[in-house]
Protein backbone atom coordinates (compact mmCIF):
# COMPACT_ATOMS: atom_id res chain seq x y z
CA UNK A 1 0.00 0.00 0.00
CA UNK A 2 1.54 3.27 -1.12
CA UNK A 3 1.51 6.46 0.92
CA UNK A 4 -1.27 8.81 -0.10
CA UNK A 5 -1.23 12.59 -0.35
CA UNK A 6 -3.98 15.17 -0.16
CA UNK A 7 -4.18 16.40 -3.74
CA UNK A 8 -5.99 19.55 -2.66
CA UNK A 9 -2.72 20.74 -1.10
CA UNK A 10 -0.88 20.60 -4.44
CA UNK A 11 -2.90 22.24 -7.22
CA UNK A 12 -1.95 21.61 -10.82
CA UNK A 13 0.31 24.46 -11.90
CA UNK A 14 -1.01 26.24 -14.97
CA UNK A 15 2.40 26.85 -16.44
CA UNK A 16 5.78 25.69 -15.31
CA UNK A 17 8.92 27.74 -15.09
CA UNK A 18 12.52 27.22 -16.09
CA UNK A 19 14.08 26.41 -12.71
CA UNK A 20 15.26 23.08 -11.40
CA UNK A 21 13.99 22.35 -7.91
CA UNK A 22 15.31 20.04 -5.22
CA UNK A 23 13.27 19.38 -2.04
CA UNK A 24 14.60 17.17 0.70
CA UNK A 25 17.09 16.71 3.47
CA UNK A 26 20.52 18.20 2.84
CA UNK A 27 22.41 14.94 3.16
CA UNK A 28 24.73 12.96 0.84
CA UNK A 29 22.07 10.24 0.48
CA UNK A 30 19.72 12.75 -1.14
CA UNK A 31 22.18 13.81 -3.84
CA UNK A 32 22.03 17.60 -3.56
CA UNK A 33 25.58 17.73 -4.95
CA UNK A 34 24.36 15.84 -8.01
CA UNK A 35 21.47 18.27 -8.51
CA UNK A 36 23.99 21.13 -8.41
CA UNK A 37 26.06 19.38 -11.07
CA UNK A 38 22.97 18.93 -13.28
CA UNK A 39 22.19 22.64 -12.93
CA UNK A 40 25.76 23.62 -13.76
CA UNK A 41 25.97 21.36 -16.83
CA UNK A 42 22.53 22.33 -18.13
CA UNK A 43 22.90 26.06 -17.53
CA UNK A 44 19.69 26.15 -15.48
CA UNK A 45 19.10 27.71 -12.10
CA UNK A 46 18.65 25.35 -9.14
CA UNK A 47 16.60 26.31 -6.12
CA UNK A 48 16.83 23.82 -3.29
CA UNK A 49 15.10 23.60 0.05
CA UNK A 50 15.16 21.37 3.10
CA UNK A 51 16.70 20.90 6.50
CA UNK A 52 20.45 20.59 6.77
CA UNK A 53 20.91 17.13 8.22
CA UNK A 54 24.63 16.79 7.57
CA UNK A 55 26.51 19.99 8.44
CA UNK A 56 29.88 18.80 7.14
CA UNK A 57 28.40 17.77 3.80
CA UNK A 58 26.60 21.10 3.51
CA UNK A 59 29.66 23.15 4.48
CA UNK A 60 32.15 21.27 2.29
CA UNK A 61 30.18 20.09 -0.77
CA UNK A 62 27.14 22.35 -1.07
CA UNK A 63 27.72 25.80 0.40
CA UNK A 64 30.71 26.66 -1.86
CA UNK A 65 28.38 26.43 -4.89
CA UNK A 66 25.62 28.65 -3.52
CA UNK A 67 25.75 32.03 -5.21
CA UNK A 68 22.20 33.25 -4.50
CA UNK A 69 21.46 33.47 -8.22
CA UNK A 70 22.15 30.29 -10.17
CA UNK A 71 22.32 28.05 -7.10
CA UNK A 72 19.98 29.14 -4.31
CA UNK A 73 19.28 27.53 -0.95
CA UNK A 74 16.11 28.75 0.77
CA UNK A 75 16.00 26.56 3.90
CA UNK A 76 13.13 24.39 5.10
CA UNK A 77 9.76 25.00 3.42
CA UNK A 78 6.10 24.24 4.01
CA UNK A 79 3.30 23.43 1.58
CA UNK A 80 2.79 27.03 0.39
CA UNK A 81 6.48 27.45 -0.37
CA UNK A 82 6.60 24.07 -2.12
CA UNK A 83 3.75 25.16 -4.38
CA UNK A 84 5.57 28.40 -5.15
CA UNK A 85 8.63 26.38 -6.14
CA UNK A 86 6.53 23.99 -8.22
CA UNK A 87 5.14 27.01 -10.06
CA UNK A 88 8.70 28.02 -11.00
CA UNK A 89 9.93 24.53 -11.83
CA UNK A 90 10.54 22.81 -15.13
CA UNK A 91 11.50 19.69 -13.14
CA UNK A 92 12.08 18.33 -9.68
CA UNK A 93 15.55 16.79 -9.44
CA UNK A 94 15.72 13.78 -7.11
CA UNK A 95 19.07 12.03 -7.49
CA UNK A 96 19.19 9.99 -4.30
CA UNK A 97 22.34 7.92 -3.92
CA UNK A 98 20.70 5.09 -1.94
CA UNK A 99 17.41 3.28 -2.58
CA UNK A 100 14.53 4.95 -0.77
CA UNK A 101 11.42 3.29 0.59
CA UNK A 102 9.12 6.05 -0.67
CA UNK A 103 9.59 9.64 -1.80
CA UNK A 104 6.56 11.77 -0.96
CA UNK A 105 8.12 14.78 -2.68
CA UNK A 106 7.96 12.87 -5.97
CA UNK A 107 4.19 12.51 -5.67
CA UNK A 108 3.79 16.11 -4.48
CA UNK A 109 5.67 17.42 -7.53
CA UNK A 110 3.74 15.19 -9.92
CA UNK A 111 0.45 16.25 -8.30
CA UNK A 112 1.39 19.83 -9.18
CA UNK A 113 2.15 18.68 -12.74
CA UNK A 114 5.92 18.95 -12.35
CA UNK A 115 7.95 16.20 -14.04
CA UNK A 116 10.53 14.43 -11.89
CA UNK A 117 14.01 13.39 -12.91
CA UNK A 118 14.88 10.68 -10.40
CA UNK A 119 17.64 8.18 -9.86
CA UNK A 120 16.65 4.71 -11.01
CA UNK A 121 16.80 3.32 -7.46
CA UNK A 122 14.33 2.03 -4.90
CA UNK A 123 10.83 3.46 -4.84
CA UNK A 124 11.59 5.97 -7.58
CA UNK A 125 10.98 3.06 -9.97
CA UNK A 126 7.49 2.63 -8.54
CA UNK A 127 6.52 6.29 -8.22
CA UNK A 128 7.85 7.68 -11.51
CA UNK A 129 6.46 6.25 -14.74
CA UNK A 130 9.50 6.64 -16.97
CA UNK A 131 8.70 8.80 -19.98
CA UNK A 132 5.22 9.68 -18.68
CA UNK A 133 5.61 11.45 -15.31
CA UNK A 134 9.33 12.03 -15.49
CA UNK A 135 12.51 10.18 -16.25
CA UNK A 136 14.50 7.54 -14.39
CA UNK A 137 18.23 8.08 -14.77
CA UNK A 138 21.46 6.49 -13.61
CA UNK A 139 23.78 9.49 -13.45
CA UNK A 140 24.21 13.24 -13.94
CA UNK A 141 24.78 13.02 -17.70
CA UNK A 142 21.53 11.11 -18.20
CA UNK A 143 19.79 13.73 -16.05
CA UNK A 144 21.03 16.53 -18.29
CA UNK A 145 19.85 14.64 -21.37
CA UNK A 146 16.47 14.05 -19.74
CA UNK A 147 16.00 17.80 -19.30
CA UNK A 148 15.92 18.09 -23.10
CA UNK A 149 12.93 15.71 -23.15
CA UNK A 150 10.73 17.51 -20.62
CA UNK A 151 8.37 18.60 -23.39
CA UNK A 152 7.31 14.96 -23.73
CA UNK A 153 5.75 15.01 -20.26
CA UNK A 154 2.09 16.03 -19.91
CA UNK A 155 1.53 17.82 -16.56
CA UNK A 156 -2.09 16.64 -16.45
CA UNK A 157 -0.94 13.03 -16.85
CA UNK A 158 1.45 13.50 -13.92
CA UNK A 159 -1.43 14.59 -11.71
CA UNK A 160 -3.73 11.86 -13.02
CA UNK A 161 -1.21 9.16 -12.06
CA UNK A 162 -0.91 10.59 -8.55
CA UNK A 163 -4.68 10.59 -8.25
CA UNK A 164 -4.88 6.98 -9.45
CA UNK A 165 -1.97 5.58 -7.43
CA UNK A 166 -0.94 7.93 -4.61
CA UNK A 167 -4.00 9.84 -3.37
CA UNK A 168 -5.42 9.47 0.13
CA UNK A 169 -8.53 7.87 -1.36
CA UNK A 170 -6.46 5.27 -3.22
CA UNK A 171 -4.45 4.55 -0.07
CA UNK A 172 -7.60 4.07 2.03
CA UNK A 173 -9.14 1.71 -0.55
CA UNK A 174 -5.92 -0.33 -0.65
CA UNK A 175 -5.86 -0.64 3.15
CA UNK A 176 -9.52 -1.67 3.12
CA UNK A 177 -8.67 -4.45 0.64
CA UNK A 178 -5.80 -5.62 2.86
CA UNK A 179 -8.00 -5.66 5.97
CA UNK A 180 -10.81 -7.48 4.13
CA UNK A 181 -8.31 -10.12 2.98
CA UNK A 182 -6.99 -10.55 6.52
CA UNK A 183 -10.53 -10.80 7.95
CA UNK A 184 -11.56 -13.30 5.25
CA UNK A 185 -8.47 -15.43 5.92
CA UNK A 186 -9.15 -15.35 9.66
CA UNK A 187 -12.81 -16.26 9.15
CA UNK A 188 -11.80 -19.16 6.87
CA UNK A 189 -9.25 -20.34 9.43
CA UNK A 190 -11.90 -20.40 12.18
CA UNK A 191 -14.47 -22.30 10.17
Image: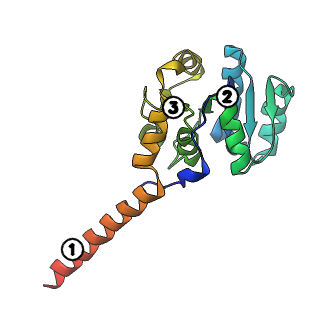
Q: State left or right for residue 94 relative to residue 33.
A: left
Looking at the rendered image, the quarter that the N terminus falls into is bottom left
Among numbered discs 2 and 3, the one appearing first in the sequence:
2
- Residue 4 image position (x, y, % from top left): 49, 55
- Residue 78 image position (x, y, % from top left): 72, 51
Comparing labels 3 and 1, the label whose residue is closer to the camera: 3
The answer to whether one can see residue 33 in this image is yes
Helix, strand or loop at disc 3?
helix
Residue corresponding to mark 2: 35
Q: How many marks?
A: 3
Comparing labels 2 and 3, the label whose residue is closer to the camera: 3
Asked if labels 1 and 3 touch by Cβ distance under 8 angstroms, the answer is no
- Residue 63 image position (x, y, % from top left): 84, 32
CA gap, disc 3 and disc 1: 41 Å
CA gap, disc 2 and disc 3: 22 Å
Looking at the rendered image, the quarter that the C terminus falls into is bottom left
Residue corresponding to mark 3: 155
Task: In this rendered view, identify the residue nearer to me: 140 or 170.
Answer: 170
**Residue 175 marker:** none
Asked if labels 3 and 2 touch by Cβ distance under 8 angstroms, the answer is no
Residue corresponding to mark 1: 185
Q: Is residue 172 above or below residue 161?
A: below
The answer to whether one can see residue 121 in this image is no
Helix, strand or loop at disc 2?
helix
Task: In this rendered view, identify the residue nearer to me: 85 or 120.
Answer: 85
Amino acid sequence: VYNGIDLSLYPLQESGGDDLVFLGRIHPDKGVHLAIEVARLSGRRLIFAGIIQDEVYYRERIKPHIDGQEIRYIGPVGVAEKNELFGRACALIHLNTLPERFGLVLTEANAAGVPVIAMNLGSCREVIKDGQTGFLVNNVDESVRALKRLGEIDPARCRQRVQECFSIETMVKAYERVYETVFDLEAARRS
